[in-house]
């Protein structure tokens, strides 16, 4: 009898806790990362599959790309990125594990008036933690400031600014993203986004994409997205689907 009461209390407290926390917020499927952090003590997984046609001679698949996150406290989360990558260039095929990234996200400010909700994300790649075809010569750091404004109960505006290094040279590639999110219903969300990469000594890559998310429950979400290049040297198009969950 005591065992049954104990199990009832545990299950009840778990249910109440799941009702108190906000619905899951993920950094996928868009390129714009969210300033929201994983709740303290929770583990979150964001994974998905992407097909991208770069040009007439090359295409690539991400099978899958996964972001692993753990909430250390309300201001800090740990992050790990893994990706199994397949690429075809002029009938030559390559596949394997891309360099693993480790990093963190830290909360900087809450939204107040014109001041956006802001967090800072940083990662470094581990050159030897990769398959032979995808190893890099050096550690590849990347960082970005992620910001979000609430425009209404249903609409938000988010943007990221940052830079990354590819692990082969000291030249940075600057990053920008802007995204408008709209909640169609409490479970169904949508977004449209403009984003780009600006290498130091090459022409920039600009792209546009959009997608939808569906909240199964507060801890599980599905997503579907697609996009296309709007500058000549950007990838032609891509589509992706995935899911995110936390425990």
Image (cartoon, rainbow, N blue to C red):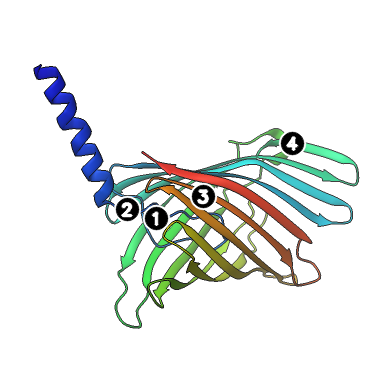
Please name the residue that numbered disc 3 is placed on.
124
Residue at 39%, 76% in the rendered image: 152
Q: Secondary structure at mark 2?
A: strand
Q: Residues within 10 Å of mark 1 (few under 14, many from 20)?
A: many
Q: CA distance from mark 2 to mark 4?
A: 34 Å
**Residue 55 drawn at (x, y percent):** 84, 58
Q: Earlier in the sequence, mark 1 or mark 2?
A: 2
Disc with the residue nearer the chain's start (4 vs 1): 4
In percent of width and height, residue 228 lies at 73, 64
- Residue at 54% x, 64% y is 190
* Disc 3 packing (10 Å; few <14; some 14–19; many ≥20): many
Mark 4 → mark 1, Cα distance in angstroms: 29 Å
Say above or below: 187 vs 193. above
Q: Which residue is mark 1?
A: 105
* Residue 76, label in figure: 2
Residue in the foreground of this view, choosing between 54 and 188: 188
What is the number of the mark on residue 95? 4
In primary-sequence order, the first of circles 2 and 3 is 2
Left or right position of 138 against 154: right
Element assignment for label 1: strand
First of labels 1, 3 by sequence position: 1
Determine contact: label 4, label 1, CB under 8 Å: no
Q: Say which residue appears at 32% left-offset and 42% top-offset.
A: 42
Q: Residue 236 appears in which quarter of the rendering? A: bottom right
- Image depth: mark 2 or mark 3 in front: 2
Mark 1 or 3: the one toward you: 1
Q: Quadrant of the C terminus?
A: top left
The answer to whether residue 99 shows anywhere in this view is: no
Whether residue 22 sits left or right of residue 80 in the image: it is: left
> How dense is the environment of label 4, judged by Cα within 10 Å: few (below 14), some, or many (20 and up)?
some
- Give residue 237's position: percent from left, percent from top: 75, 59
Callout 1 touching callout 2 (CB < 8 Å): yes
């Amino acid at each position: 009898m005591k065992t049954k009461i104990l199990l009832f209390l545990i299950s009840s407290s778990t249910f109440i806790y799941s009702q108190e926390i906000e619905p899951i917020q993920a950094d996928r499927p868009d390129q714009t990362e969210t300033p929201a952090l994983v709740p303290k003590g929770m583990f979150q997984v964001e994974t998905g599959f992407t097909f991208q046609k770069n040009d007439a001679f090359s295409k690539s698949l991400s099978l899958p790309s996964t972001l692993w996150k753990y909430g250390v406290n309300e201001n800090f989360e740990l992050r790990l990125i893994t990706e199994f990558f397949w690429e075809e260039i002029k009938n030559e095929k390559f596949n394997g594990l891309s360099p693993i990234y480790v990093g963190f996200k830290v909360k900087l400010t809450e939204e107040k008036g014109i001041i956006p909700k802001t967090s800072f994300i940083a990662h470094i790649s581990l050159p030897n933690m990769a398959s032979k075809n995808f190893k890099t010569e050096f550690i590849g750091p990347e960082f970005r400031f992620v910001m979000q404004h609430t425009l209404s109960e249903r609409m938000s505006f988010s943007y990221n600014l940052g830079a990354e290094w590819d692990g082969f040279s000291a030249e940075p590639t600057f990053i920008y993203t802007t995204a408008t999110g709209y909640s169609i219903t409490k479970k169904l969300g949508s977004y449209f986004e403009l984003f780009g990469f600006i290498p130091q000594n090459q022409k920039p890559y600009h792209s546009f994409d959009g997608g939808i998310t569906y909240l199964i429950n507060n801890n599980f979400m599905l997503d579907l997205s697609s996009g296309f290049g709007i500058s000549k040297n950007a990838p032609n198009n891509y589509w992706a689907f995935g899911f995110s969950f936390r425990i």
